Image (cartoon, coloured by chain):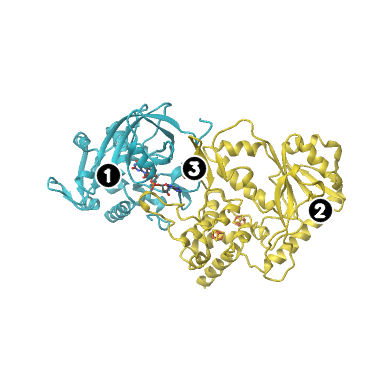
Chain colours: A cyan, B yellow
Amino acid sequence: MRKNPYQPVEADVEEIIAESPVIKTFALRPREEIPFATGQFIELSVDGIGEAPFTPSSDPNNKERIEITAMNVGSVTAGLHEIKKGQAVGIRGPYGKGYPLNEFKGKNILIVGGGVGLAPLRSLIFALLSQVNDYKKIYLRYGAKTPGDIIYKDQFSHWQEHIDIELSVDKGDSGWKGRVGVVTMLLENFKEDLNNTVSIVCGPPVMMKFATLKLRELGFPPENIYLSMEKNMSCGLGKCGHCRVGKYYVCKDGPVFNYAQLQGIPDIWD
Amino acid sequence: MRTLFLNTKDLPDFLNNLSKEYSVYVPSKIKGKGLPCDFGFKLPTHDYLWEKLSAVKKEDLAFNDYRSIESLRAFFTRSKEKLVLSDNENKIAVFGVKACDLFCLKIQDFVFSGGEIKDPFYERRRASALLISGDCLSFKEACFCLALEINPYPGEGFDLNFSVLENGFVVDVGSDKGEEAIKASAALFAPATSQALAQREEKRNALARNLSGHLERHKIPSKDVLQEIVKAGYESDIWQAEAEKCVECGACNFVCGTCHCFLLAEDRFGNAHERVRLWDCCSYANFARVAGGANPLKLRYQRVRNRYLKKFDFFPENFAISACAGCGRCIEACPAKIDIRSVLRKLNEEKSLSAR
Ligand SMILES: Cc1cc2nc3c(=O)[nH]c(=O)nc-3n(C[C@H](O)[C@H](O)[C@H](O)COP(=O)(O)OP(=O)(O)OC[C@H]3O[C@@H](n4cnc5c(N)ncnc54)[C@H](O)[C@@H]3O)c2cc1C
Ligand code: SF4
Ligand code: SF4
Ligand code: FES
């Protein structure tokens, strides 16, 4: 255990992949091992600017190299997007509880992602595929604003061998042959034994809200719907008080919750 | 627990002996703004501030009647500090801690020394600090500890506790650290007589009687219903009405001994950047804002309400006690005169009205 939990470990930026005009994936090699479980998050710091929470998007089985897929939306992420290969960032973590893979065993898995929300889900997909026989059927339903906003494009064909994938965009372009509309549309005719299926949702708050409502409408029991909550975070340790939702701290008790835990708390989607 | 007796005239010597090992802080009396009592009670309005023993003149050395203005937590997490562990931190001894202060410290302990990951900055200071508490001799208009079933005299959580009698103090030794601390002054202490203990009992009861007489008029709902009324009042108009007065200064958060929220930031020191921790405040508009501008506590009334939910719902759920000691500091500090006692009372009234 590190003596000072606020002190990050330095990590060298090994590779930078442009995923979309505003999203980049950073492959980091921490100077001390930071083993994480899929769904856990880290605090990433950019020198002189500050920290922000991210869920690694890489395979948790790879302990030397952690990938972070970050959208440029504000001060820390803008600083991060300026970073060049060979520079260093700081990492603290991992924090929180990851996806409860044990509870997914033997079940169908419906993954629902929106925008950059596919980042943590990619890590989950890697984890699932590394033990693909433990699960029944795996589905991925993913929506992005435009075809240009779809991330990890080159990986879908590989995943398709094991995963039933459908994509949609809010707004198509001339080259787009797929479906157009919000991602909940892709859930419309989902047919599986719902008592033996878990759904894992990650995306912008509005998308998570409507996806959850849709899944409930389809008949998913609340405890089979897993959500990644995004709240303001500072410490990641359950101390700074920023990420409270009802009786939970998202950083410590989450960031993954099942809907049965959250259901009774007012205004969770705000 | 050992109970001893110390003559009034020997207090300065005892504190001086302590200062060989500790940086000793004592309450110094200052003129207070003081709130007049709504019900015409004549209550003291002076205040206390903790100061270094060395800065207080011998004749000004006072046993404080009640709690000081600032809360104890400032000794354990600074309002702003660099997060660099140092091995030569001062050991502190704080004299004049009150029952409400000790209650608040339970919350700080839960936050910073609890959970899987401990805060080493807090833990070190807390482990080395000597807490010398004392019975209250009177109370301020804003004090309402007893309404929350916290007695105005400490029963636990101290290293030493002082109860004032005519000519000296009954001293409870509450910990090994307390035992250690009186060793160098062993000659000054005598065993407490049963007479002294009886006198103390009488004084304690008299104060509790006076305080509950004062509190009766405020109609503060009982401790057992607080969580329920704060939750039931989620949609109440009370929050909106209080929020209209709030100026978002953050005073209520910063003076509160159970408030603990903080923000990690990078600060520039010369050419280097260092990690700092700042006390944060849920009354501020950006407290819960996330990237992209979404903010679950966007409106001021949501933030006012959040403060109550945190204290009376979150903490009972996670730690089985509410995070309010009834010290009344937030009542005195609020320029908008938002009064936690009346907020709780109104919530309770609304709840019982709606139940009819
Ligand atoms: C568990 C978790 C996992 C996440 N995973 C990912 C991911 O994989 N990929 C991804 O792209 N995004 C992810 N996010 C979102 C990401 O953390 C945010 O996009 C990021 O915090 C934005 O930081 P910023 O500084 O660029 O934005 P800003 O808008 O500048 O700031 C973001 C936050 O910091 C606070 N803040 C900034 N400055 C101050 C200040 N001066 N005072 C007070 N508060 C301030 C704001 O209130 C705001 O909450 C995740 C979020 C969480 C909670
Ligand atoms: S909420 Fe007010 S009365 Fe309660 S402990 Fe904090 S400052 Fe004291
Ligand atoms: S002290 Fe009063 S005005 Fe200031 S933030 Fe607290 S409630 Fe609002
Ligand atoms: S991020 Fe600090 S308590 Fe959750």
Residue at which label 1 appears: A110
Q: Is residue B165 left or right of residue A36?
A: right
Q: CA distance from mark 1 to mark 2?
A: 68 Å
Q: Is residue B36 left or right of residue A230?
A: right
Residue at which label 2 appears: B200
User: Which is more foreground, mark 3 or mark 2?
Assistant: 3
Q: Are marks 3 and 2 in contact (CB under 8 Å)?
A: no
Which amino acid is tagged 1?
A: Leu
Q: Does mark 1 fall on the same chain as mark 3?
A: no
Q: CA distance from mark 3 to mark 2?
A: 46 Å
Which amino acid is tagged 2?
A: Arg
Of mark 3 and mark 2, the one earlier in the sequence is 2
> In the drawing, what numbered circle is on residue B264?
3
Which amino acid is tagged 3?
A: Leu
Q: From where the camera sits, is residue A99 visible?
A: no
**What's the residue at 59%, 64% (across, down)?**
B339
**What's the residue at 25%, 38% (across, down)?**
A19
Query: What chain letter is assigned to the residue under label 2?
Result: B
Q: Position of residue A145 (x, y in %)?
A: 23, 49
Q: Based on the displayed image, in which of its 4 quarters is residue B179 positioned?
A: top right
Q: Is residue B239 left or right of residue B224?
A: left
The residue closer to the viewer here, B281 or B237, is: B281
Q: Based on the displayed image, in which of its 4 quarters is residue B121 positioned?
A: top right
The residue closer to the viewer here, B162 or B172, is: B162
Q: Quadrant of ligand 3?
A: bottom right
**What's the residue at 84%, 44% (across, down)?**
B6
Q: Is B150 located above or below residue A116 in the figure?
A: below
Q: Position of residue B197 (x, y in %)?
A: 83, 50
Q: Is residue A159 left or right of residue B353?
A: left
